Amino acid sequence: MFNESRRVSTFSIVVGGLLAAMSIILARFFGLYLFGNSVRLSFGDIPILLSGVMLGPVVGGLTGAIADIGGVLMTGGAAGPYFPGFTVSSFLTGFIPGLVFLRSKDEHKLIKIIISVVIVTVLVSFGLNTLWLSILLKKGFWLLLPARATTALIMAPIEVAILYLLLSRIRIG
């Protein structure tokens, strides 16, 4: 049902669109900003991660990119101007779990979820998003990193738990 093929099905487009919309709502309307705009607590990454697992790396990545661009358009840039770096980060947030789950979706599900969330947290949250914020806010990377790392380390286990619960109840084989 949710397999990666050369052609993207109508079903994948619809599910990806719904998950992008859920991400926008969770991130932009129910997100909590701390320390100005440098740290955001939200569950907006969960639908994007879920999209990568269920629909594969390409659709997962596109879901993330569409969620980022759509979120900026819907909020009018209330949290800051559009920055293409965050679109790349959102793409990777969906793409990476899609790669991790590409071969087999049911074997070692919890381990694959942990690997996906750890890679996304380290590469995207710690690395790229902190870099993009340091460019936008004109503040040092190392100055922003401690607050961002703290919130990412709080959110990562929560994301793992929620993803595991969701994926335990969704047939993705």
Image (tube, rainbow, N blue to C red):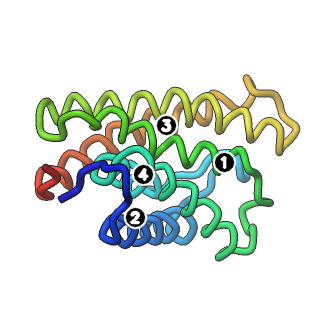
x then y, percent, for residue 124: 56, 35
Which quadrant would residue 135 be assigned to in this image? top right
Q: Nearer the viewer, mark 3 or mark 1?
A: 1
Q: Residues within 10 Å of mark 1 (few under 14, many from 20)?
A: many
Q: Residue furthest front?
A: 6
Whole-Å distance between the Cαs marked 2 and 4? 7 Å
| Vertical order, 19 against 102 (above or below) | below
Residue named by callout 4: 60
Marks 3 and 1 close (CB-CB < 8 Å): no
| Vertical order, 150 against 65 (above or below) | above
Which numbered disc flags the more N-terminal residue, 2 or 3? Answer: 2
Label 4: which secondary element: helix
Whole-Å distance between the Cαs marked 1 and 2? 19 Å
Which residue appears at 37% of the width and 48% of the height?
52
Whole-Å distance between the Cαs marked 3 and 1? 16 Å
Label 1: which secondary element: helix
Residue named by callout 3: 152
Which numbered disc flags the more N-terminal residue, 3 or 1? Answer: 1
Marks 1 and 2 close (CB-CB < 8 Å): no
